[in-house]
Image (cartoon, grey):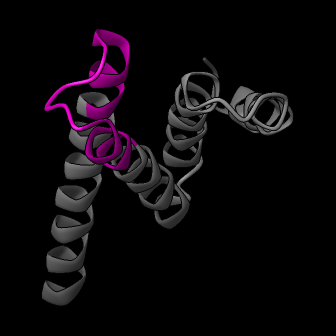
Amino acid sequence: MNAGEYEPALQLYQALVVMDQAPQWQLPIVLQMASCFRELNRHQRAVESFEFVVQEIDLMRENSGVDALGAELEFLADSAAWQLGLLKWYDGIAQRVAGDA
């Protein structure tokens, strides 16, 4: 995807996410929105979105009383957690570089 395509994609995802309240519908879209935010250098919004996915799936696990949900939701949780870790690592490096300057 070209850099100029992330903003229209984000707008499309924002329109789609409200079409259905089911987590199985919304969480993959929020994950895509988070990726767009990351590519648009809106890191705080990306972090918030990735955290939302992880927290919602954690809450679903707690409410269901099981250790693991379906493969699709677990994949979303793992993907969001990995991306969140990467962004936090990146932000830490950026802060160190800015501090050395």
Horizontal side, residue 21 vs residue 36: left or right: right
Q: Position of residue 73 (x, y in %)?
A: 36, 22
Image quarter (top left, top right, bottom left or bottom right) of the C terminus: bottom left
Q: Position of residue 21 (x, y in %)?
A: 72, 35
How many numbered marks have been drawn onto this rendered protein structure?
Answer: 0
Q: Nearer the viewer, residue 98 or 69?
A: 69
Above or below — where is 97 with respect to 91?
A: below
Residue drawn at (23%, 78%) of the image: 95
Above or below — where is 46 with respect to 76?
A: below
Q: Is residue 74 magenta?
A: yes
Above or below — where is 46 with respect to 20?
A: below
> Which portion, as a residue range, is magenta?
57-77
Horizontal side, residue 87 vs residue 40: left or right: left
Q: Residue furthest top?
A: 71
Residue 93 sits in which quadrant?
A: bottom left
Q: Position of residue 16 (x, y in %)?
A: 81, 28
Q: Tell me the chief SS of the magenta region.
A: helix
Q: Position of residue 99 (x, y in %)?
A: 18, 88
Residue 75 sits in which quadrant?
A: top left
Residue drawn at (53%, 25%) of the image: 28
Q: Is residue 28 magenta?
A: no
Above or below — where is 66 with respect to 90?
A: above
Horizontal side, residue 61 vs residue 17: left or right: left
Image quarter (top left, top right, bottom left or bottom right) of the N terminus: top right
Residue drawn at (23%, 57%) of the image: 90
